[in-house]
Amino acid sequence: MAQRSPLSQAFAEDHRHMTRGFWKMRKNLEADDLPAAKQLADNIDQVVGPHIEFEESVYYPVLRKVLGNEFVDQLYAEHRIGRAVLLEMEKLSTDAELTGAQRHILIKRIKQTLEHAVSCATLLSHLDELDENRQQIMLDQLEQLRATGHRWTELNENPTA
């Protein structure tokens, strides 16, 4: 297998962090450990925010040209589900008692977000197809967004791209 570009490696690392975080959050909710789940949600919000911003402002517009509007619109919709989970977790007090229905809905949305992260990671091939100069420009943009450090919940819920 050919070595991945630095951009693809950074993209994949972000997805691993997101996937691990949401998986652990789901496990914490299933175990009724709301404080740990809230802590993970806060970490995901902070660490994954720049990656989501990169996807929505830089990468998804490129994918529109290749995969079409309907497919990319679905990716944005899936981001809104993940963002909603983080916002809901943020609203809960650490000592809140979740009802079974609340827990079920959160876990269902987390599973949807995990499915998105896994399927979105398969789009790496589109990054690798870009010429080296374009990849470097996009990597620089990702690194700049990481330095800015916007939280996922701070991003526009309905990005225009």
Image: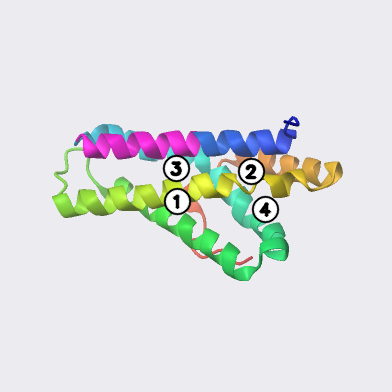
**Helix, strand or loop at mark 3:** helix
Q: Is residue 26 magenta?
A: yes
Instruction: Specify whether 117 is left or right of 136.
Output: left
| Residue position for label 2 | 145
**Helix, strand or loop at mark 4:** helix
Instruction: Specify whether 14 is left or right of 139.
Output: left
- Disc 4/disc 1 C-alpha distance (Å): 19 Å
Residue at position x 22%, y 48% from top? Answer: 103
| Residue position for label 3 | 45
Residue at position x 50%, y 46% from top? Answer: 117
Task: Choose top left, top right, bottom left or bottom right for residue 43.
Answer: top left
Q: Are marks 3 and 1 in contact (CB under 8 Å)?
A: yes
Q: Nearer the viewer, mark 4 or mark 2?
A: 4
Give the x, y percent position of residue 145: 63, 43
Residue 58, numbered circle: none
Residue at position x 60%, y 37% from top? Answer: 12
Instruction: Give whichever of discs 4 and 1 has the lower sequence position.
Output: 4
Q: Are marks 4 and 3 in contact (CB under 8 Å)?
A: no
Instruction: Give whichever of discs 4 and 2 has the lower sequence position.
Output: 4
